Amino acid sequence: MSADSSSGSVWEQIHTVDPVICNWNLAFRKESKPPKMASTIPRRAPAYFTRRGGVDRRFFERVHRFIETRADAERNRTRNLRSLRSAGNLPRLMGRMFRCDDGAPCEELLCSRCARRYRLWLAGQCLSFAVEPVEAHLVTVLLVAVRGGLLHTVGVRAEHERLRKRLIRCGVRSAIGGTEAAYEAPNDRWVVHVHLLVFGDIKHAIARLRVMAKRDGFERPVKCQRVRDPVSQVTYLQKFVTYHRPGKASAGGKGWAYPLKPRHVAELARWFAPRHFGDFAFLLGFRRRGSRIVAEPSFADIVAEAQEATWRRGDARKTATRLALISP
């Protein structure tokens, strides 16, 4: 197959995605170089989040029900492409997202297709630890707030290191989660925060963390709730959303979600640009090895302490409840 025919087939697929973007396609074709022949394209290893990483298949079957469907991901991806086209100045990002394929994911954070696969992988990995017979809490920590247009100044790694030091000083030994940026339209600001799955008895640790986090100027910098439904709660740890909720939350719910304006999507894209999915994962007492997340000795110590306490009480209900998640 010639380079021209290969290029034509790609753009025919693009035209079927969204006709509103078709005019941009012609300009992109003129600016982009002719595609390489298949024999000259270097092979690369599949993205680590496209594999199970040794986790029981049943975990992934459980989390599928709480993560967006393929159809939802495609709709979100098309909307993001429309926003990027309206904002302009990001043709290379759009080109990579257009060429995304199940066999060769683009690994762009604004590509909802890739983000969905990463979220499934991370949720499955986290669930394998959440079913252990140990107390766990879902903790949200607000890290930093910046005005609109300044999101690119926030360093994810620096914020992770600052939070990691605080957690260690508070006595937290094991935590895993994800980092997000939420846009607040009434205040025209971005709030960067993390959702963490924290293991062990953290009653005193959370009290100390709240005192430390108050210095950052947030009204409620730390929210904590006990993990009672691990499957639904671990899927909340990491999201890559391009919507905001400008209205007030109703009783027991949230405000209506509205898509971000193109300029805000472009700002988010520039913040994402030098980073990968794994850069937004927060790990304390865990580390990634290839397609797996493995626990360090601190997590094993927490599990052993919980099992000893359970044995002393003669209470095995917690163990039975967690293990029931993967029973047929």
Image (tube, helix red, strand yellow):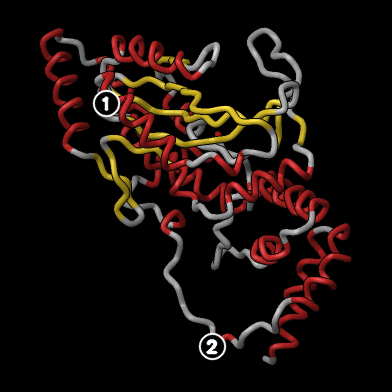
Name the spot of residue 217 as percent of width and height, x first. 53, 16
Q: Is residue 274 above or below residue 241?
A: below
Is the C-beta separation of discs 1 and 2 under 8 Å?
no
Q: Amino acid at mark 1?
A: Ile
Pointer 1 or 2: first along the chain: 2
Mark 1 and mark 2: span between their CA atoms?
Answer: 49 Å
**Mark identifier at residue 168:** 1
Name the spot of residue 29 as percent of width and height, x first. 78, 76
Q: Is residue 29 above or below residue 155?
A: below
Q: Residue furthest bottom?
A: 2
Q: Amino acid at mark 2?
A: Thr
Lateral position of residue 297 relative to residue 38, left or right:
left
Q: Is residue 328 visible?
A: no
Q: Residue at x 53, y 50 (%)?
A: 117
The 10 Å Cα crowd at callout 2, few under 14, some 14 to 19, many 20 or more, is: few
Which quarter of the rendering shows the N terminus? Answer: bottom right
Name the spot of residue 292 as percent of width and height, x first. 32, 50
Q: Is residue 239 visible?
A: yes
Which quarter of the rendering shows the C terminus? Answer: top left
